[in-house]
Structures are given as structure tokens and as C-alpha cells.
Image (spheres, helix red, strand yellow):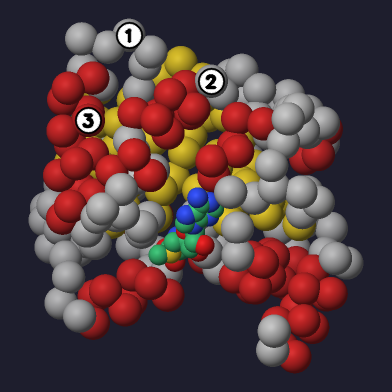
Amino acid sequence: MGKDKLKRFSQMLTFENVIQPEINFYSKDDDLKGNWSTVFNNQNPIVLELGCGAGEYTVALAKHYPKRNFIGIDIKGARIWKGAKSAIEEDLDNVRFLRTKVDFVTKFFGENEVDEIWLTFSDPQPKKPKKRLTSNLFIDRYLKFLKPNGVVHLKTDSDLLYNFTLEEIKSNGFELLKNITNVYKDSYVDSQNLKKVLFVKTFYEKKWIELGKTIKYLGFKIHPKRI
Ligand SMILES: C[S@@+](CC[C@H](N)C(=O)[O-])C[C@H]1O[C@@H](n2cnc3c(N)ncnc32)[C@H](O)[C@@H]1O
């Protein structure tokens, strides 16, 4: 491992906004489950960014919505370090980063504990549909902690993930709130002031845009009853 990475890892141990559970396979729920309001010391809504990378979205959302709490989740420590550091530098007390695999997310959040989920430039997993973060396997996990009427936001450069997710929304009878095929070109009614957050560009997004990819967005509500 490079010196820089080691330095970041040891620095991260001192960051109060980073939670790094010691093991990554749990036979029991984490103590944090159902107790995030004590972490933030308030009852504000909780929003997750799953696969947050360097946390640009988590940090940007936290600045836009100071009355909501944001938790960026990723398995890569060196990436989380960046987001955590910038949240500290910006004095954001409504941000935390949790280092774990999204696969274990139900071990960390209790029933009705989460208000919204953001999926930003998630891996489209071309060969492993079940591993896509909008597959039924993952949606069933989210339903265990997302509030009724909780919203899932997907922002992606991937046609595969976009079309797959649209299909999941249709086949499950989920409520599609917004379908934007080109975030930066389409004209759409912005009643909820979504644009100000959709225009945030992460490191990966900038790369995809340079490669000529169009950025797509789906906002939808999920519920347990399938058609
Ligand atoms: C393409 S990057 C996107 C990062 C960030 N959302 C952005 O837009 O810049 C995907 C991220 O998801 C993380 N990731 C992928 N699968 C994961 C999993 N099962 N659990 C936790 N993190 C995961 C990777 O470590 C990586 O940081």
C-alpha cells in the first residue's frame, strides 16, 4: 500500500465524522441501527448516498440542505477520506461517512430510519444484474429501512443501469416521480428545485461527460407490494 494511502487511513481514524466498523461481515446488527438520531443529535431526516466514492454528492447535498442529515457509504477508505476531510473543513455537522459494503446496509439502519437514498454513478454491473444497486435484491434491503414514500434518486451515465432501473420501476409498479434523459439539456419542470442538486458534478461524472456520455436521472418511490 502506498505511503499516501497509509497516511490517509491513519488520519481517518481521527476523523469524528467517519465510522469504520472493524469487520465487514456481521452476524448481528450494528449498535448504530435505529440510533442515528443520537449520532447527529437531532431528529432531522436522514439521507444516504450509497457508493459515495469521494463523497462529493454527500457534501454538496449537506450544504444545500442543512436541516437534513447525510451519510455517505462506501467500502473504499481512501475515497471516503476526501469527503470526510472536506466536510470537516467546511464545518458540516450534518455529514457522516460509513465505511462498509452496501450489501450490509440493513445491519446499520432500522425500520423507517431513512428518508431518501441517492445512487450516484453506481457501477452498472453489466454481467451481474443482481449486484446493481437498483436490483430487486437491493430494493428489498432498502425497503427494510426506508420510510413509506421515501424517494430513491438515481443519477447515472449508464444506459444499461438507467434502462434496467426503468424496467424495475415498471415491473414493480413503483411510482416514477421524474425521468430525465439528459440532465444538462432537457427542459423539465423543476418544481422541487432539483436542478440545484442535479447540477453537482462528481469526479466520475466529469470523466463521463468528457467521454461524451449523457447524464440521466430517475427519481422514484418504492413500496413492498409488487404487481
Ligand atoms: C463509479 S464510483 C462512483 C462514486 C461517486 N458516487 C461519484 O459519483 O463520484 C462507484 C463507487 O461505489 C463504490 N461501491 C461499489 N460497490 C460497492 C458496494 N457493494 N459497497 C460499497 N461501496 C461500493 C466503489 O467503491 C466506488 O467508490
Kind of residue sitting beneath label 2:
Lys
Kind of residue sitting beneath label 3:
Glu
Closer to the chain start, of discs 2 and 3, is 2
Which label number is shown at residue 225? 1
Compared with residue 2, is residue 133 higher up or lower down, i.e. above or below? above
Query: Horizontal and vertical percent for residue 106?
Result: 60, 30
Q: How many marks?
A: 3
Q: Secondary structure at mark 1?
A: loop
- Please give left or right for residue 16 compared with residue 90 in the image: right
Query: Horizontal and vertical percent for residue 179?
Result: 18, 41
Disc 3 versus disc 1: distance between alpha carbons?
13 Å
Kind of residue sitting beneath label 1:
Lys
- Please give left or right for residue 132 compared with residue 73 in the image: left
Compared with residue 74, is residue 139 higher up or lower down, i.e. above or below? above
Disc 2 versus disc 3: distance between alpha carbons?
18 Å
Q: Residue at x 34, y 45 (%)?
A: 132
Disc 2 versus disc 1: distance between alpha carbons?
13 Å
- Give the labeled residue for mark 3: 168
Closer to the chain start, of discs 3 and 1, is 3
Q: Residue at x 33, y 70 (%)?
A: 205
Q: Is mark 2 within 8 Å of ligand 1?
A: no
- Give the labeled residue for mark 2: 144
Tell me if residue 95 can be seen: no
Q: Residues within 10 Å of mark 3 (few under 14, many from 20)?
A: some
Q: Secondary structure at mark 3?
A: helix
